RNA sequence: GACCCUAUGGUCUAGCGGUUAGGACACCUCCCUUUCACGGAGGUAGCCCGGGUUCGAUUCCCGGUAGGGUCGCCA
C-alpha cells in the first residue's frame, strides 16, 4: 500500500505583481500581462500586487496613474496590495508598501550602500555600476524553459551596468529587483521583451544573497502585420475598448485567448472559468497578432447575453456620449426602442448610428438605398400603405404587420416591396431593427409624418 | 554586429511519432427570414525550407530562412 505523504514544507504562497510605468495610457499588452498575473494569483489563491514604477518623475503624473487604476478596475482585475488612488503619497493597501517607486528611495539607497560595501558595485564617473558576472546565466523560465544568456559582443566590452545614474536616480533593473525582493514576489510574470534582461536581474538577486523569483515570460501581442504594437497603433491602448463601447468581459476573454488556450475547442468562457483552468506551463511561447475581428465577434456574443438593465445603462451612456438625448422620451419608450436593438448591435459605439432615428426627428435617407426604394412605381404603393396605417386604431407591431401584409396582398406585391421604402422613410437606413416593432415604438403620428416627408423624394 | 525567443490555413489555436491534421474568427455558398443580425447546413484555405533519427515525422535533433525581442545614466 502506498502511503500518502505530506510535502515537507507547505508550498509557499504565491505573490505576483503587475508593475506598470505610468505613461498616460494602459497598453493592451500590459493589460494582458496584468490579466495573466491576476489569473495566476486567483488560480493559486495567492496575492496580486500592483506597483507603480514611477521613477521617471518628469513624465509621470497622478493622472497617468489613474489611467492605469481605472483601466484595471474596468477589467475587473482587483489587486490585493497596492495604491488606492493615483496619489503617490496617498494611502495604499497591503503591508509591503509603499507601492510607488518614487516613495521607496530610502530602500534603494540602503541596498546600493550594501552592494557598495560588499564590493559588488562601484562608483564610475558619478554613476554607480554593478559588477556583472562574465559567465552565462541560466534563466529558468516556466514558459520558455531554461534559457542560457551569455553576454553579447557589446556587453563583453563592458559587462557592468549602471544601477544609479550620476544624478542619483536608480535605474529600472535595480529598483525592479529590489522591489520584487522586498515585496516577496514569488513569480515574475511579464512580457517576453524582458527575457534577455532577466540575466541582469538574476545577477542582482545573487548579489543581494537571495534566490530569484520564478520567471514566466509571456509572448507579446503584435499588430496584424507582425510589427510591435506601439502607442500609435489602433487598439494599442485599452482606452480604445472602453471608448468604443466594448464590454470588459469580451476584452478579458479575448486577451485570454492570446497565448493561452482552454484546449477543448471552446472560445467563450468567463473569467472564473479561466481562473480554474489557467496555469503558467501551458502558456504559449510564440507571439500573437491582435485580431480586432475576433474580439468584435466575442463582443457581439457578450452583448447579446447582457441582462436588460445593463444593456439599457450602457446604451443610454453610449447615446449620450454621441450627443443623443434620450431624456426627451418617456423611459418606457426608450426601453422599448432599445429592446428592438438588442442582439443586433455588436458594440455600443454602433448604437447611435443604428438607433439614432428613435431620438431625433431629422431623418436623412441613405442615398444609395433611396435610389432603389424611392422609385416612382413604389410611390402609389407607399401611399396606399400610409392610408392603411392612418386608419389603424391600435398601432402595435401585430396590427402593423397584419395591415402591411393585407396591403401587400391587395397590391399583389411581396411584403418586401412595402417594407424597404417604409424602413428607409422612417429610419433613413436600409437595415435596422424589426420594422413592425420599430414603427410601434415610433408611433403612428411620427410614422405617418416621416412617410409623408419621404414621399416627396420619390422619382 | 552579438545574443535570446519563436514558427500549424489570412488570424487565434488543438495536436505532444502512425489523425481523413480538430475548433474558432474572417471569407464564400445555401437555408431560415420584413432588412440587418442571430441561428442552421456546406465550402475554400494550413503543418516555413533542407538535412538527419525512425519502419514511419506536423510532432524529436541539426542547419537555414523568416518574424519578434534584448544588448541605454528609458521603463
Image (cartoon, rainbow, N blue to C red):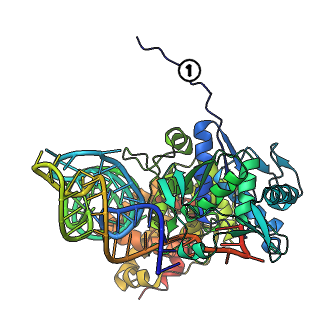
Instruction: Give the quarter of the image for residue A102.
Output: bottom right
A78 and A326: which one is in front?
A78
Q: Nearer the viewer, residue A52 or A400?
A: A52
- Residue A278 rendering spot, x and y as whole percentages: 51, 43
Residue lying furthest front: A119
Indicate the chain on which mark 1 is placed: A
In the displayed structure, does residue B14 sit left or right of residue A302?
A: left
Q: Is residue A211 above or below residue A431?
A: above
Residue drawn at point x = 58 percent, y = 44 percent: A40
For residue A88, say whether it is visible.
no
Question: Which residue extends farthest bottom?
Answer: A459
Does the rendering let one see residue A165? yes
Residue position for label 1? A6
Q: Residues within 10 Å of mark 1 (few under 14, many from 20)?
A: few
Counting the numbered discs, the total is 1
Q: Quadrant of the N terminus of chain A?
A: top left
The answer to which quarter of the image holds residue A416 is bottom left
Q: Residue at x 54, y 54 (%)?
A: A139
Amino acid at each position: 500500500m502506498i502511503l500518502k505523504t505530506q510535502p515537507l514544507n507547505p508550498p509557499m504562497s504565491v505573490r505576483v505583481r503587475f508593475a506598470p510605468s505610468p505613461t498616460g495610457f494602459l497598453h493592451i499588452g500590459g493589460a494582458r500581462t496584468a490579466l495573466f498575473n491576476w489569473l495566476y494569483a486567483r488560480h493559486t489563491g495567492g496575492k496580486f500586487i500592483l506597483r507603480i514604477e514611477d521613477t521617471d518623475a518628469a513624465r509621470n503624473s497622478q493622472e497617468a496613474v489613474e489611467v492605469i487604476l481605472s483601466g484595471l478596475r474596468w477589467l475587473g482585475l482587483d489587486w490585493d496590495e497596492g495604491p488606492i488612488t493615483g496619489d503617490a503619497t496617498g494611502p495604499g493597501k497591503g503591508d509591503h508598501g509603499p507601492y510607488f517607486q518614487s516613495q521607496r528611495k530610502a530602500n534603494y539607497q540602503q541596498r546600493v550602500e550594501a552592494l557598495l560595501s560588499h564590493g559588488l558595485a562601484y562608483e564610475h564617473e558619478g554613476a554607480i555600476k554593478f559588477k556583472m558576472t562574465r559567465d552565462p546565466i541560466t534563466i529558468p523560465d516556466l514558459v520558455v524553459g531554461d534559457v542560457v544568456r551569455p553576454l553579447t559582443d557589446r556587453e563583453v566590452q563592458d559587462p557592468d551596468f549602471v544601477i544609479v545614474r550620476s544624478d542619483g536616480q536608480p535605474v529600472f533593473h535595480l529598483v525592479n529587483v529590489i522591489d520584487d525582493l522586498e515585496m516577496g514576489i514569488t513569480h515574475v510574470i511579464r512580457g517576453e521583451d524582458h527575457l534577455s534582461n532577466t540575466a541582469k536581474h538574476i545577477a542582482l538577486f545573487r548579489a543581494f544573497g537571495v534566490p530569484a523569483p520564478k520567471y514566466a515570460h509571456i509572448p507579446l501581442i503584435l499588430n496584424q502585420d507582425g510589427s510591435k504594437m506601439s502607442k500609435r497603433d489602433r487598439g494599442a491602448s485599452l482606452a480604445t475598448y472602453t471608448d468604443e463601447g466594448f464590454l470588459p468581459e469580451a476584452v478579458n476573454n479575448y486577451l485570454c485567448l492570446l497565448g493561452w488556450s482552454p484546449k477543448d475547442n471552446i472560445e467563450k468562457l468567463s473569467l472564473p472559468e479561466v481562473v480554474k483552468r489557467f496555469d503558467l506551463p501551458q502558456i504559449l511561447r510564440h507571439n500573437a497578432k491582435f485580431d480586432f475581428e475576433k474580439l468584435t465577434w466575442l463582443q457581439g456574443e457578450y452583448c447579446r447575453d447582457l441582462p436588460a438593465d445593463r444593456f439599457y445603462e450602457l446604451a443610454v451612456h453610449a447615446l449620450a456620449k454621441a450627443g443623443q438625448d434620450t431624456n426627451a422620451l418617456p423611459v418606457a419608450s426608450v426601453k422599448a426602442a432599445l429592446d428592438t436593438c438588442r442582439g443586433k448591435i455588436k458594440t455600443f459605439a454602433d448604437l447611435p448610428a443604428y438607433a439614432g432615428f428613435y431620438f431625433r426627428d431629422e431623418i436623412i435617407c441613405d442615398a444609395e438605398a433611396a435610389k432603389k426604394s424611392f422609385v416612382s412605381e413604389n410611390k402609389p404603393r407607399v401611399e396606399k400603405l400610409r392610408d392603411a396605417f392612418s386608419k389603424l386604431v391600435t398601432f402595435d407591431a401585430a396590427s402593423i404587420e397584419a395591415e402591411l401584409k393585407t396591403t401587400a396582398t391587395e397590391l399583389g406585391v411581396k411584403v418586401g416591396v412595402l417594407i424597404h421604402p417604409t424602413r428607409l422613410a422612417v429610419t433613413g437606413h436600409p437595415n435596422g431593427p424589426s420594422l413592425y416593432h420599430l414603427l410601434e415604438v415610433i408611433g403612428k403620428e411620427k410614422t405617418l409624418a416621416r412617410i409623408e416627408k419621404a414621399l416627396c423624394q420619390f422619382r
